[in-house]
Image (spheres, rainbow, N blue to C red):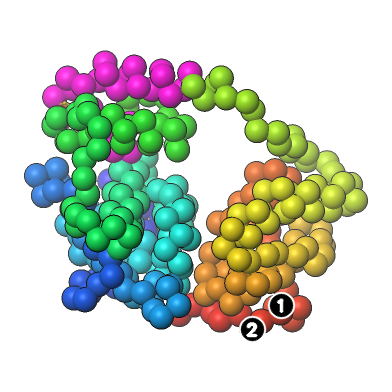
Amino acid sequence: MWEYTDKVKEHFFNPRNVGEIKDADGVGEVGSLACGDALKLTFKLDEKGRIADAKFKTFGCASAIATSSVLTEIINGMTIDEAARVTNRDIADYLGGLPEQKMHCSVMGREALEAAIDNYRTGGTKKHELEGKVVCTCFGVTENEIERVVRENDLSTVEDVTNYCKAGGGCGGCKDEIEKIIERVQGEKSKAPAVSRPAKHHKLTNIQKIQLVQQTINEQIRPALRADGGNIELIDVEGNKVIVAFRGMCAQCRLTEFTIKEVVEARLREFVSDELYVEEDKDSAAEPHVHRG
Ligand code: FES
């Protein structure tokens, strides 16, 4: 029996946005019934180019249904460029985590989203195309896909790769090749220059904490928000509570709560302290914030 979070169970028993948009702007289909999972994602844009509606049809287990359901929630209100940056890790994190053996469901969600965006941008195929050499013929997984899951999720064993994209989970004939791909990708990563990041301190003075929070916002968070025409300002730090205000596009974004948790809070915990949590100072926001739901 898998250990599922309450959020996975909730989305499995009450999936959101089930169905198919008939005159969709983007359509993405991935997986196959033969492999045990299949997902079709459709979305429609509003006149400002934001995703106004997203629906899914899926065949699969509880986590396939839950990941598809949250994916439609995550991308609702996003621009195409924002949606293109959603990773499988974002989807799994939004659910409070997935059993390792079920991480391939989050990868399937990300692939369906990419296929739908590609369909919108190029008007091309509505099926997820296999790019590159097929390594795992049992599940039709290519070298490019394996490289990507290894790189993005920092995987180090064949078993990890099977959990994330199923490759290696059938006859096992591709395991040697998967091993070589892992070695190559991990080797490339170790040669890449290390990203400078401050070491996490557990005993920071209040002044040090504020300086580190400000530095992390300046270097790690603001550039990502600026790319979408938004900005963020540090308002105050009270103990472990960090109060911020969003500016520009971020102030009007329907996904501010998602941005706070998955971008701002996650980065501050990574670079400053695990104990930090973030709240938005709505009074000082330049524009009214529209809540989801
Ligand atoms: S070829 Fe990959 S498991 Fe069979």
Q: Residue at x 29, y 58 (%)?
A: 122
User: Is residue 70 inside the magenta stretch?
Assistant: no
Q: Residue at x 64, y 83 (%)?
A: 288
Q: Secondary structure at mark 2?
A: loop
The quadrant of the rendering that contains the C terminus is bottom left
Considering the whole magenta stretch, tell me its main secondary structure: helix
Which sits in the foreground, 218 or 109? 218
Disc 2 residue lies near ligand 1 with CB under 8 A: no
Residue hosting label 1:
285
- Amino acid type assigned to the residue bearing label 2 in the image: Pro
Which sits in the foreground, 197 or 120? 120
In the image, 101: left or right of 211?
left
Q: Where ligand 1 lies, by quadrant?
A: top left
Residue 29, image x, y percentages: 20, 56
Outermost left residue:
34
Instruction: Kindly tell me whether residue 44 is visible in this rendering.
Output: yes
Residue 45, image x, y percentages: 36, 74
Residue hosting label 2:
288
Q: Secondary structure at mark 1?
A: loop
Which sits in the foreground, 56 or 219? 219
In the image, residue 259 above or below residue 49: above
- The answer to whether mark 1 and mark 2 are in CB contact below 8 A is yes
State the mark number for residue 144: none
The stretch of residues the image draws in magenta is 161-187
Quadrant of residue 252 within the rendered picture: bottom right
In the image, 37: left or right of 265?
left
Residue 64, image x, y percentages: 27, 54
- Amino acid type assigned to the residue bearing label 1 in the image: Ala
Q: Residue at x 68, y 56 (%)?
A: 222
In the image, 2: left or right of 150?
left
Q: CA distance from mark 1 to mark 2?
A: 7 Å
